[in-house]
Image: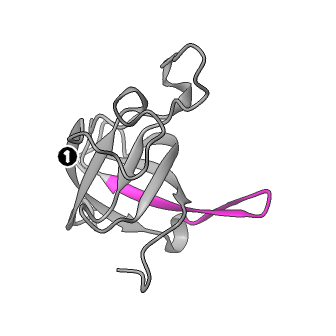
């Protein structure tokens, strides 16, 4: 049985650090919009007591993390900001990005996310 692509069922807004400049919620239009699949389950990752969420995205989606070479002088905030689902007020910082199934028909991108509080209550 062949592996299949995940279903990308949620709209996702993505802002670059230089666009949102540490202001949450951002006032600027997102730099990138995409569809994604907010998933944990077997992809859930624990690190030093933190649990991260994962977002599966179509291959080559332009989502970045701090190791991507973005250098903002005098500003330590250099990760992309995501809102998923778009318009929900649920914001995440991108911790790292990896390609899954690279070179295969089921290739897609994974972004590991940390929640940025506060979230709306009740959680949408």
Is residue 45 part of the magenta span, yes or no? Answer: yes
Q: Is 106 rendered above or below residue 70?
A: below
Quadrant location, the C terminus:
bottom left
Q: Is 45 rendered above or below residue 100?
A: below
User: Magenta segment, which residues?
Assistant: 44-56
Q: Residues within 10 Å of mark 1 (few under 14, many from 20)?
A: some
Q: Which residue is mark 1?
A: 33
Q: Position of residue 91 (x, y in %)?
A: 42, 58
Q: Position of residue 112 (x, y in %)?
A: 51, 51
Q: Report the side of 98 relative to 85 (left or right).
A: right
| Residue 85 image-quadrant placement | bottom left
Q: Report the side of 78 relative to 87 (left or right).
A: right
Q: Position of residue 56 (x, y in %)?
A: 35, 56
Which residue: 26% across, 50% down?
13
Q: Is 64 rendered above or below residue 108?
A: above
Which residue: 26% across, 42% down?
59
Which residue: 49% across, 24% down?
68
């Amino acid at each position: 049985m062949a592996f299949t692509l995940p279903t990308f069922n949620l709209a996702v807004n993505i802002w670059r650090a230089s666009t949102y400049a540490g202001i949450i919620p951002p006032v600027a239009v997102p730099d990138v919009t995409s569809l994604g699949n907010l998933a944990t389950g077997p992809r859930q990752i624990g690190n030093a007591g933190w649990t991260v969420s994962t977002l599966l995205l179509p291959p080559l989606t332009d989502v970045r993390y701090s190791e991507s070479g973005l250098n903002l002088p005098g500003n330590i905030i250099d990760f992309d900001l995501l809102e998923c689902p778009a318009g929900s007020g649920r914001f995440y910082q991108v911790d790292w990005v990896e390609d899954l199934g690279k070179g295969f028909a089921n290739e897609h991108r994974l972004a590991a996310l940390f929640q940025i509080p506060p979230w709306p209550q009740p959680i949408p």
